[in-house]
Amino acid sequence: MQELTHYINGAHVKGTSGRFADVYNPATGEVQAKVPLANAAEMDIAVQAAAAAQPAWAAVNPQRRARVMMKFVGLLNDNMDKLAEALSREHGKTLPDAAGDVQRGLEVVEYCIGAPELLKGDFTDSAGPGIDMYSMRQALGVCAGITPFNFPAMIPMWMFAPAIACGNAFILKPSERDPSVPLMLAELMEEAGLPKGILQVVNGDKESVDAILDHPVIQSVGFVGSTPIAEYIYGRGCSNGKRVQCFGGAKNHMIIMPDADLDQAADALIGAGYGAAGERCMAISVALPVGEETADRLIAKLVPRIEALKVGPYTSGKDVDYGPVVTAAAKANILKLVESGVEQGATLVVDGRNFSLQGYEDGFFVGPHLFDHVTPDMDIYKKEIFGPVLSTIRAGSYEEALGLAMSHEYGNGTAIYTRDGDTARDFANRVNVGMIGINVPIPVPLAYHTFGGWKKSAFGDLNQHGPDAFKFYTRTKTITSRWPSGIKDGGEFNFKPME
Ligand code: NAD
């Protein structure tokens, strides 16, 4: 059995806590490795190494730091197949989807090559007689990130690339479900020229997370995962005086107006609802057709498409639409929620409950499900299922559909399918959700914009990546500088406006 390690101060280090978690191959259900779960003492070793290395890294000029990012992009491309394979083996997603996971992280690294431009400060010449005023952005010091299982390459890169480009040291606590790719990323960053101690991977669970939250040297914490944990980390991190941003769960609605191209909308729902087995925070999990006729036509188009979905292991290559879910527990939770939907009166139009794949009976595969006639009081609507389950609520009007999207506790992403610009515009302006798709089902912003939801999908002030990341990972310092000329006056005792 392979024993994974931590990556501390430039070396693979075995766990010493004596605690491990099993890492599965979700396609076969087999345990393929065990990952060490760090305790506070192990976390402290990484923090001390980070604190020792960080001042020298912050002193490297931003263009040279950016060159490390440039080289890292090249290495990511060179190692794309290897990274994707390792990612699929632990996560279960298809190989093209795994390569997309790496690619979407790589794009944020590319954006970080612009760090010298993004870190340039502001300068006011002659703010007063002999006085110049300037602001600069300085690195925070030691930063930490806690990431979820569903994007084990992309989300760590969304955090560590801007943090490190800004001159910080970064400690990554990845998901214990699929820790191999984060370890590979740390190795590649050092191959790209990053000094030891600037990017470290400490594997673990709640114990190591608490060690991050309580460590006085760690200045900032980024978290992506489920909402209850996001709320916990935000509360404890903030009360310990850290800068914290936490991104949580989702329940993304897609409104389908009567004038929409229904083939396009149905295709979009298939990709956005069932891609990656629904394990995406930007997956569409609720379809809101407006009007009975739209709903009937949409369901008629969805059913054959769903029945044609190919579910299988990543080793079947491009001939698979989606793979298994991440663990047996995730599968059990999804099926339990499906049962609750049936018990609470929703119509299960496509029933994936008895899905089984020959030769992979022990894998964590879940067949696709489609519910119709779902109502807002049902658990399948209120809770995040994080599986291949699409719920349809038939809305009587646009206002009713909009109201549903607005009153749901989550506000990560949402979409509308329509041919009417006025409706689309009204929707984008009024809906209280962070990322909006207009005839686009999964509106994930590109690296140079920012990513973040509203309501219970995000806690904190700034979004991920884009310009916000450069604000999150730096502090502003403003200097008022006076070089008097001519006769020097005596002391000044009054707080005066600038002349
Ligand atoms: P999770 O909340 O179970 O775990 C996320 C991280 O928190 C992991 O590193 C885990 O080790 C740690 N953790 C788990 N339990 C903890 C505890 N009790 N105390 C402290 N730390 C703990 O989430 P997951 O199952 O890995 O990921 C799926 C969730 O992430 C979904 O809810 C999904 O919507 C969300 N997600 C959100 C976004 C976003 O940007 N909003 C992106 C991706 C995933």
Image: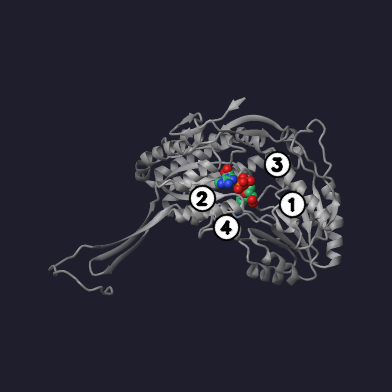
For label 1, the SS is: helix
Real-space Cα separation, disc 2 to disc 4, in angstroms: 11 Å
Q: Which residue in the protein does label 4 denote?
A: 458
> Horizontal and vertical percent for residue 453?
60, 59
User: Can residue 465 be spotted in the picture?
Assistant: no
Asked if residue 128 lies left or right of residue 202, the reply is left
Kindly identify the residue that appears in the image at 76 percent across and 39 percent down: 365
Q: Which residue in the protein does label 3 denote?
A: 329
Real-space Cα separation, disc 1 to disc 3, in angstroms: 20 Å
> Horizontal and vertical percent for residue 433?
63, 63
For label 3, the SS is: helix
- Which quadrant is the C terminus positioned in? bottom left
Q: Which residue in the protein does label 2 denote?
A: 222
Real-space Cα separation, disc 2 to disc 3, in angstroms: 26 Å
Q: Which residue in the protein does label 1 denote?
A: 273
The tag earlier along the polypeptide, 1 or 3, is: 1
For label 4, the SS is: strand
Q: Residues within 10 Å of mark 4 (few under 14, many from 20)?
A: many
- Quarter-of-image position of residue 491: bottom left
Camera-nearest residue between 36 and 275: 36
The tag earlier along the polypeptide, 1 or 2, is: 2
